[in-house]
Amino acid sequence: MSQEPGTGLARPLSRRAILGGAVALAAPGIASAQGDWPSKPIRIVVPFAPGGTTDISARLLAAHLGARLGGTVVVENKAGATTTIGAAEVARAAPDGHTFLMAPPPFVIVQFAFPNLPYDPEKDFRPVAMVLRSPFILAVRADLPVRSVAELVALAKSRPGALTYGSPGPGSLPHVATELFRLRTGIDILHVPYRGGGPALLDLAGGRLDLYFSTPPETAPHVQSGRVRVLAVATPQPSPLAPGLPTIASTVPGLHVEYWSGLMAPAATPDAIVARVNRETQAVLAMPEVGERLAALGSAPAPGSVEDFARMLAAERVQFREAVAAAGIRVQ
C-alpha cells in the first residue's frame, strides 16, 4: 500500500525521480516533439462503462478540447476492478501527452483499499485539471422517524447496529462517505453492499434500507415519489445543485464529501503539455453550454490550476486513508 511522503527515512530513488531523469536526458527531443503535439489522437480513458456522469462529461470535454488543440480527442471506456483497469492502462502509457485518465474518487480510495495495485497513484500520475464536482446528499427511507442529521445520529445511537446503509460495493464513494459519517459521529450502522447504486436506491425507496449517500439526480425520482427523504448535503457550504438543504457539516463539523472527476496524466508527461491541457480545459469549462450540460447531470464545472487539483487530491487522500483504515475496507 502506498504511503505518504515525508517520513524522513532514506529510500531508493523513486520511480518518478528515475523517469524525471530520463525526461531530462531526452529534453531536446521532447521540446522538439511538443511543436508537433498532438501528432495523433489524444485518448481520455474513462474507468467506467459508458453512460454515467464521468463518461458523459469526458465526451463533452473531448468534443471541445479537440477543436481547441487542433486534433482529435477520443474517449475510451476501460471499466472494471474499481477503476484500476483503466488507471493501470494510463500508468503504462507513453508520457507524450496523448493519453489521459478521467479520474473519479475511487482513483484515490483504492490506494488505501486495494492491497496489490499494479501502479502507484501518486508516483505514476500527475494532476492536470479538475473537470466537475457533484454534491453528495444523505437520503433516508421516507418512513424513518428522523427529519435532520442530528435526529438520525440520535436514533442510530439509541439503536446500535440496527440501522442499515447501502453502497454500490466496497470501496465505492457512497461506502467510504458513510464510513466517514459513521467515524465522525460514533454511530454503529450496518453496511449492505449492492451491485450498483440503482438496486440500493430501490431498496431505500422500498423501505428495506435506512440510509444512503448519493447525488441529487440519482435520488430525485424517489424523492418526487415521496418514498425517500433527503436530510442534508455533504458540501462545506449550501449547494445550488441541492437547493434548500442544510449541510451535514453544520451538525458534523469537517464532514465534506463530493463526487468529482479530473484529468490525470502519466507522471513524466512534459510540463508544457500539462499546462496547455489545463489552460484549454479552463476555457472549455467556461463555455455556457458546457455549464448547462453539466448542470443537467447534477454537476458543476470545477475550474482551477494544476496546483488546485493537486491540493484537492492531497486532502482527499487524508480523509479517505482515515475512513478506509477505520472500516477495514479491502477491495480484491
Image: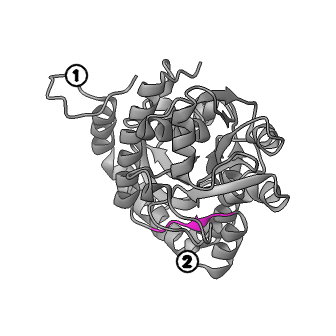
The one nearer the camera, 60 or 100, is: 60
Whether residue 16 is visible, yes or no, is yes
Q: What residue type is disc 2 on? A: Ala
The one nearer the camera, 119 or 329, is: 329
Q: Residue 185: x and y, percent?
A: 44, 40
Seen in the image, is 63 located left or right of residue 68? right
Whether residue 119 is visible, yes or no, is no
Q: Residue 299: x and y, percent?
A: 63, 64
Q: Residue 43: x and y, percent?
A: 63, 50
- Name the residue tied to disc 1: 12
Report the magenta residues as a range. 298-303
Q: What residue type is disc 1 on? A: Pro
Label 2 vs label 1, nearer the camera: 2
* Earlier-in-chain disc, 2 versus 1: 1
Q: Secondary structure at mark 2?
A: loop
Where residue 232 is drawn, which disc sits there?
A: none
Instruction: Identify the residue at image location x=69%, y=39%.
Output: 210
